[in-house]
Image (cartoon, coloured by chain):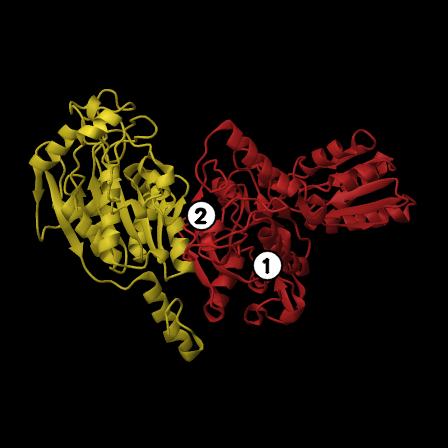
Chain colours: A red, B yellow
């Protein structure tokens, strides 16, 4: 289906990545947002609070991030598309509910505008150190989807994609901005509503008597029903059977948790998104995401000027990780260079997928500002 | 309606008897395929569920729009036994989940049914803010003075000097007066009953089903397994006798004076007032600001 025009601010804008994320959510059909103020994410909900009254949305500033992250689940089960927005410490507080939404297959979006950590860290300055937390932060085994935009335009485009993936796979999608992308201002083009594709919620057409809440379809995703429609849904964070009833036994656990994981892993080819440039004849490929991918461009330009064969690989979807493509690229290059604003997270995924065929070189940065391109240049040079 | 049945001689001889048992009137509110439930013999929670089912019948509201949200704990299991749209959420977070549910679809009647530990300890912050906002939620809190499901640990409702597994020498923390907390945070309806006072409890539950705003009922209930036996109360029945003998039903008394101690349990309806709900206040503000450009949210035209 296409976007509802009431939420789509068609036109050319000069806005920051946080505001652009807000407009992406509005275009995607998000009509419920709960949040708690935290730098550097607050601008997203400030714009939501200002925009929602006239588009039929409802925003509530709750007492903390824990409340915000479960309120969106409630809103989804009552029929709304919903998201919450946070940074660093707030993201840590939301972890339990990422697991709850994964377990109950509640489609929703968590936005994390990453700042420097750990703890209170660098409230106003950038980091990219929540990447593994996004993947593994809640307890237990599960899979999520995570995206990382590198521009204000992409903050708009990928927010829509985040909502669409959440609906398609009934999974919480984590939108991993960083402070730089969140706070920088660029041109953003918002297309007309009829050019924006929206993935609708997968409501069942079955009658209540024939409906099993968690009976999976061919792609392992079950059909949904919502409160008030006569299905008497039962949603629990306990391990459950296809009726949704608690079934706290090893066999039920085996069936459920494997399906929750496999519905993402088996559909990974459909979910992964990345950009490649000049990887065909490359000796070294720079793997990056978010703002760091733009800083790396300068280093790549210098390296190419100096005759080095450098390709680029930019992750737009970070989780699930594009394993197959990295493994294929590893067969024909000498090294991956991985600059990231942390002390080593995605580099280990690259190393794992390289299977020993290519070196993986981290260009670490503890956060607070972007890399110096010189450091990335030296890493490229040193890897050859 | 009760039916008496006597086994006939020929039935005893043949070993076959055909009982005609009328359906229990609360059966249709329960997921009978989930029985037996997990609650212990003598536990008060089941009694409250029975009252709730009867209150639903009497209130005659559309069951299709009734949702029950629980957190975690023994009372947290209530939602899963009710044959309604039911949500068994995370520990302490039933109220914010219910807030999302209610705001996303204001036509739903949203009941939060959970325990004292869930709503008032880990979930205390959400409780006070939902009351302050006058969120249109019906909060039913079964207070058994203890953490039951985890094995009898001290709670913010455990009476002074009571023995719990994490207060093995007797509790030395002051307990919360829940009705007073609810009243001072802005609840529009506040009552306390016990699992013994089923008539009054059913009536109170029926009342809040159609009352707008943040309504709160505390129900004192026995936990024979983990509270009573450590605290010189023989069993659930003896605890019910205590509720019968030591309860004092008051009228027109502030919740501030609703004490619970060795001598007495003060019960009654402490608050029944009107305040604008969260959505009413929001709609009023936006209508003021935006005029006819604003379509009141969740209001049937």
Which is more N-terminal, label 2 or label 1?
A: 1
The one of A303 and A136 positioned closer to us in this rendering: A136
Residue A229 rendering spot, x and y as whole percentages: 43, 57
Q: Nearer the viewer, mark 1 or mark 2?
A: 2
The answer for which chain carries disc 1 is A
Q: Position of residue A179 (x, y in %)?
A: 60, 51
Q: In the current view of this chain or complex, which residue is farthest to the bottom?
A: B292
Say which of A374 and B215 sits in front.
Answer: B215
Task: Name the chain letter of the residue that bears numbered label 2.
Answer: A
Q: In the figure, is residue B255 to the left or right of A3?
A: left
Residue A21's disc number? 1
Of A213 and B265, nearer the camera is A213
**Res B72 visible:** no
Q: CA distance from mark 1 to mark 2?
A: 21 Å
Q: Quadrant of the C terminus of chain A?
A: top right
Q: Residue at x 7, y 35 (%)?
A: B245
> What residue does disc 2 label?
A70
User: Which image quadrant for residue B276?
Assistant: bottom left
Q: Please indicate, yes or no, whether residue A346 appears anywhere in the rendered image.
A: yes
The image quarter in which residue B248 lies: top left
């Amino acid at each position: 289906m296409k976007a509802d025009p009431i939420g789509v601010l068609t036109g050319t804008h000069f806005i920051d990545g946080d505001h652009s994320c807000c407009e992406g959510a509005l275009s995607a059909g998000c009509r419920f947002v709960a949040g708690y103020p935290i730098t550097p994410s607050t601008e997203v909900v400030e714009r939501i609070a200002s925009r929602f009254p006239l588009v039929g949305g409802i925003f509530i500033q709750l007492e903390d991030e824990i409340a915000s992250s479960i309120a969106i689940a409630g809103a989804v089960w009552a029929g709304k598309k919903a998201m919450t927005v946070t940074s660093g410490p707030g993201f840590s507080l939301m972890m339990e509910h990422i697991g709850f939404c994964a377990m109950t297959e509640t489609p929703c979006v968590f936005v994390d505008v990453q700042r420097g950590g750990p703890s209170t860290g660098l409230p106003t300055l950038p980091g990219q150190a929540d990447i593994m937390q996004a993947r593994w932060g809640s307890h237990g085994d599960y899979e999520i989807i995570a995206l990382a935009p590198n521009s204000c335009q992409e903050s708009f485009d990928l927010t829509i994609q985040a909502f669409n993936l959440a609906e398609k796979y009934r999974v919480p999608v984590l939108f991993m901005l960083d402070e730089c992308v969140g706070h920088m201002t660029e041109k953003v083009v918002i297309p007309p509503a009829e050019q924006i594709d929206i993935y609708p919620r997968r409501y069942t057409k079955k009658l209540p008597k024939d409906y099993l809440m968690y009976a999976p379809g061919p792609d392992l995703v079950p059909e949904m029903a919502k409160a008030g429609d006569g299905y008497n849904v039962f949603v629990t964070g306990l391990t459950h059977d296809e009726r949704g009833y608690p079934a706290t036994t090893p066999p039920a656990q085996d069936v459920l948790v494997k399906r929750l994981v496999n519905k993402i892993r088996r559909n990974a080819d459909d979910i992964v998104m990345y950009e490649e440039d000049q990887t065909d004849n490359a000796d070294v490929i720079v793997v990056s995401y978010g703002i760091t991918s733009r800083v790396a461009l300068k280093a790549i330009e210098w390296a190419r000027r100096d005759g080095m064969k450098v390709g680029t690989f930019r992750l737009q979807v970070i989780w699930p990780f594009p394993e197959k493509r990295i493994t294929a690229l590893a067969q024909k290059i000498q090294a991956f260079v991985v600059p990231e604003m942390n002390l080593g997270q995605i580099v280990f995924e690259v190393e794992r997928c390289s299977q020993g065929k290519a070196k993986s070189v981290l260009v670490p940065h503890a956060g607070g500002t972007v890399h110096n391109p010189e450091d990335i240049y030296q890493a490229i040079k040193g890897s050859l | 309606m009760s039916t008496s049945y006597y086994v006939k001689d020929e039935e005893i001889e043949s070993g076959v008897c055909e009982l005609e048992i009328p359906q229990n009137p609360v059966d249709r509110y329960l997921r009978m395929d989930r029985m037996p439930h997990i609650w212990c013999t003598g536990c008060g929670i089941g009694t409250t569920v029975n009252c709730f089912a009867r209150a639903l019948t009497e209130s005659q509201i559309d069951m299709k729009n009734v949702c029950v949200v629980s957190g975690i704990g023994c009372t947290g299991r209530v939602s899963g036994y009710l044959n309604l749209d039911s949500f068994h959420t995370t520990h302490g977070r039933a109220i914010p989940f219910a807030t999302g549910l209610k705001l996303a679809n204001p036509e739903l009647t949203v009941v939060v049914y959970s325990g004292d530990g869930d709503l008032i300890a880990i979930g205390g912050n959400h409780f006070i803010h939902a009351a302050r906002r006058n969120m249109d939620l019906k909060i039913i809190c079964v207070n058994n003075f203890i953490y039951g499901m985890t094995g009898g640990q001290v709670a913010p409702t455990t009476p002074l000097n009571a023995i719990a597994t994490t207060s093995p020498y007797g509790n030395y923390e002051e307990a919360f007066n829940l009705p007073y907390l609810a009243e001072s945070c802005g609840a529009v309806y506040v009552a306390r009953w016990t699992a013994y006072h089923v008539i009054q409890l059913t009536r109170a539950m029926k009342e809040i089903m159609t009352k707008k705003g943040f309504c709160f009922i505390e129900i004192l209930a026995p936990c024979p397994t983990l509270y009573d036996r450590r605290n010189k109360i023989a069993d659930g029945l003896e605890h019910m006798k205590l509720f019968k003998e030591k309860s004092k039903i008051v009228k027109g008394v502030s919740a501030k004076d609703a004490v619970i101690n060795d001598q007495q349990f003060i019960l009654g309806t402490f608050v029944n007032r009107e305040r604008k709900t969260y959505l009413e206040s929001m709609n009023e503000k936006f209508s003021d600001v935006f005029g006819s450009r604003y379509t009141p949210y969740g209001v049937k035209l």
